[in-house]
């Protein structure tokens, strides 16, 4: 496959450029919004904190929000890369396969049964468990029947599970007004309630998952060639699959616990990375991580300005941007065989 | 042989119709106020007590009629789509029809904010549903359409319209959020005779056209080349059927919101009961769809009293395992 950047040197340079872009996006995310600040104010709120309104906004809202966006964008993009490599399906991603919806359902169900008594670290585990159960279900259901896990079956299963989960979600929301207050939050992802503590609690899990994903790059390359080749080259496929699913569950479940289900990041970013640097996962993974973070930061920035009076949840923005992308992707010649 | 099996099929259809009628009578009687069966029948022939008359005719009957019409519309729409796409897993949800209609309706509710009569709601739904399915169909068209391309683009278009729905919900006043949520889940709560009068002509007209054209649908299902060979203008007929399917599904959404999985389940159950002839399947599937939604609504309004749970939630809870079963069976057949 022809890619934009071919030599290793150019890829490395491109990566530096992507990181630079990420820093710019993060800065823009802190600086611009309903209120815009300059750099001096931002630095001042950490070096000489006076407790003024502006400094409070920066410290409790803007900076946590930018960091959360970056962390989630990165995690969702990585889980998309892993899922696409594992299922050898260019359209796999946590939102299409219903993993996000499952995680959201598990959190909403717990909130419904026990009320808002949970600390964030408990919610986080509910997210993990929900994502884990859904991932296993999809895997099992899609394996049933002729031809194993074909792309069409995987997508239909995912969309059926997702609509099942969202129906149960609305059931819980409708029979309990308390849960309804959080309704929109769990229907679509939003970053407006980002909280520094929550992000920091989640970070260690994410970090471990990122590192494991990076170490798996070589296995991913081999896995993408097909089971027979991979087994022939001495890879223990079952073991690699289990680890991949675990990493995806932590990344997707954790993201949902932090910000609700945000769709289409996991499907778009890996394709953009592959378009830039080809199919080698040793490059695709880091590129996707950086580009995913940048994309979500920019999408969040955009959603602050879409409506005059209120903020649009970032999940709405990514979904609308994502559709154009998927349509182009599905119509492309390389997917001619599907 | 042919005659006896034909008689057998009409027997089965009559049995289904009878089942629907029994469910209808039961459903009218059950509710927060139980009305004995005998009184129901008395009230239906206008000889019952005045208090029953009011509850039954002004509250329950319109709601139940709406459930029957919506269920039948969804089922016919699903039957047509499954035959056209030649894929047993197709349904109006897959083409983006349901989510497009929902987005249009929520936009209508929140942006117009009750300034325009509800009678226009089905029209809004129709426009939204047609727009979304047309978009899916056109975008998936590339030297013909493939099931996976339709599925994939349909899923994405649905997601985008879902996002738009939430956008409209937020853009409008907060007190409408709960109303919009209930709507999205799919419910026939609060339907009146006005709704029924708006919906009925569409369903009956489109249903009859589909029934009269069912022979063409059979031929289309076999394959484009054979259809052309026996003198059917494939593209024109296909367009007609897609239009019928979209009109049925979106006018149903206009009345009842996003009722999911009925369009998927009913045709399969129908095919299991009667032969694989689309004309018969259409009738059976319409009855079964009506029955499904009637029962879902009955559960929704009786089990969780005093709450009224949207029927769409129960059809989804029933539909997802059904979907898994379909997948399993499809795999076994090879």
Image: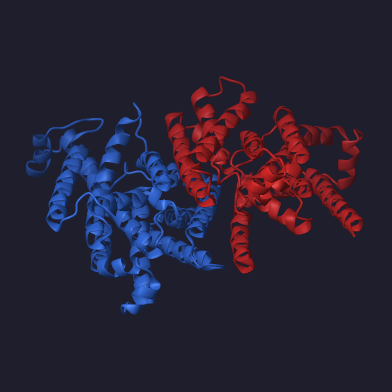
Residue at left offset 30%, top offset 66%: A220
Is B163 rendered above or below residue A134?
above
Colour scheme of the rendered structure = by chain
Q: Colour of chain B?
A: red
Nearer the observer, A320 or B308? A320
Which chain appears blue? A
On the image, which quarter does residue B274 sit in?
Answer: bottom right
Q: Position of residue B78 (x, y in %)?
A: 65, 46
Which residue is farthest front?
B229
Nearer the observer, A30 or B32? A30
Q: Position of residue B191 (x, y in %)?
A: 68, 33
On the image, which quarter does residue B29 sit in?
Answer: top right
User: Is residue B38 visible to us here?
Assistant: yes
Horizontal side of residue A229 vs B284, given as left or right: left
Is B30 rendered above or below residue A142?
above
Horizontal side of residue B208 vs A321, given as left or right: right
Residue at left offset 51%, top offset 37%: B138
Q: Position of residue A329 (x, y in %)?
A: 39, 47
Horizontal side of residue A318 vs B271, given as left or right: left
Which residue is farthest top?
B115
User: Is residue B306 visible to us here?
Assistant: no
Horizontal side of residue A317 vs A144, given as left or right: left
Is A46 rendered above or below residue A245?
above
Q: Position of residue A85 (x, y in %)?
A: 35, 62
Nearer the observer, A171 or B223? B223
**Quadrant showing the N terminus of chain A:** bottom left
């Amino acid at each position: 496959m022809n890619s934009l950047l071919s030599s290793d040197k150019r890829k490395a340079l491109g990566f530096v450029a992507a990181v630079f872009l990420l820093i710019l996006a993060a800065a823009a995310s802190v600086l611009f919004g309903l209120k815009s600040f300059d750099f001096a104010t931002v630095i001042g709120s950490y070096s000489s904190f006076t407790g003024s309104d502006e400094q409070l906004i920066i410290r409790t809202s803007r900076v946590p929000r930018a960091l959360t966006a970056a962390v989630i964008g990165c995690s969702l993009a990585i889980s998309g890369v892993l899922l696409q490599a594992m299922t050898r399906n260019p359209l796999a991603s946590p939102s299409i396969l219903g993993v996000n919806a499952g995680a959201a359902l598990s959190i909403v169900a717990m909130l419904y049964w026990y009320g808002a008594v949970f600390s964030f670290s408990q919610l986080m585990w509910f997210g993990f468990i929900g994502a884990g159960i859904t991932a296993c279900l999809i895997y099992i259901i899609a394996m049933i029947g002729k031809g194993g896990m074909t792309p069409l079956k995987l997508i239909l299963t995912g969309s059926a599970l997702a609509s099942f989960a969202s129906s149960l979600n609305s059931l819980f929301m409708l029979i309990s007004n308390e849960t309804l207050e959080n309704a929109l939050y769990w229907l679509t992802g939003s970053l407006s309630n980002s909280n520094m503590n929550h992000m920091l609690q989640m970070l260690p899990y994410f970090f471990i998952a990122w590192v494991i994903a990076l170490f798996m790059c070589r296995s991913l390359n081999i896995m993408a060639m097909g089971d027979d080749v991979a087994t022939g080259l001495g890879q223990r496929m079952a073991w690699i699959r289990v680890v991949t699913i675990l990493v995806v569950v932590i990344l997707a479940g954790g993201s949902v616990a932090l910000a609700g289900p945000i769709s289409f990041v996991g499907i778009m970013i890996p394709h953009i990375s592959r378009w830039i640097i080809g199919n080698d996962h040793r490059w695709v993974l880091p590129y996707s991580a950086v580009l995913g973070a940048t994309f979500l930061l920019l999408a969040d920035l955009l959603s602050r300005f879409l409506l005059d009076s209120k903020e649009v949840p970032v999940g709405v923005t990514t979904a609308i941007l994502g559709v154009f992308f998927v349509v182009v992707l599905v119509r492309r010649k390389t997917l001619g065989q599907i | 042989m042919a005659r006896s099996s034909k008689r057998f099929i009409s027997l089965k259809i009559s049995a289904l119709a009878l089942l629907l009628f029994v469910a209808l009578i039961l459903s009218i009687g059950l509710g927060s106020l139980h009305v004995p069966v005998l009184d129901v029948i008395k009230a239906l022939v206008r000889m019952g007590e005045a208090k029953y008359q009011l509850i039954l005719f002004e509250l329950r009957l319109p709601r139940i009629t709406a459930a029957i019409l919506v269920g039948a519309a969804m089922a016919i729409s699903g039957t047509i789509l499954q035959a056209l796409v030649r894929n047993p897993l197709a349904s109006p949800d897959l083409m983006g029809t349901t989510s497009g209609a929902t987005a249009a309706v929520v936009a209508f509710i929140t942006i117009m904010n009750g300034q325009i009569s509800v009678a226009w709601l089905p029209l809004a739904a129709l426009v939204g549903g047609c727009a979304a399915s047309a978009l899916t169909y056109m975008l998936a068209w590339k030297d013909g359409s493939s099931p996976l391309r339709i599925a994939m683009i349909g899923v994405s278009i649905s997601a985008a319209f879902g996002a738009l729905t939430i956008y409209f919900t937020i853009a409008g006043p907060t007190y409408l959020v709960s109303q919009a949520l209930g709507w999205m889940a799919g419910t026939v709560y609060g339907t009146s005779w006005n709704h029924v009068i708006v919906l009925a002509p569409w369903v009956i007209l489109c249903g009859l056209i589909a029934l009269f054209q069912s022979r063409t649908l059979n031929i289309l299902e076999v394959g484009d080349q054979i259809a052309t060979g026996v003198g059917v203008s494939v593209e024109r007929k296909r367009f007609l059927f897609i239009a019928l399917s979209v009109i049925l599904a979106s006018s149903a959404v206009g009345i009842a919101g996003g009722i999911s999985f009925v369009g998927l389940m009913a045709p399969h159950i129908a095919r299991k009961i009667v032969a694989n002839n689309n004309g018969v399947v259409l009738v059976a599937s319409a009855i079964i769809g009506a029955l499904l939604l009637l029962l879902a609504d009955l559960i929704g309004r009786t089990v969780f009293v005093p709450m009224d749970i949207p029927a769409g939630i129960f059809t989804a809870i029933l539909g997802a395992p059904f979907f898994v079963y379909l997948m399993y069976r499809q795999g076994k057949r090879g």
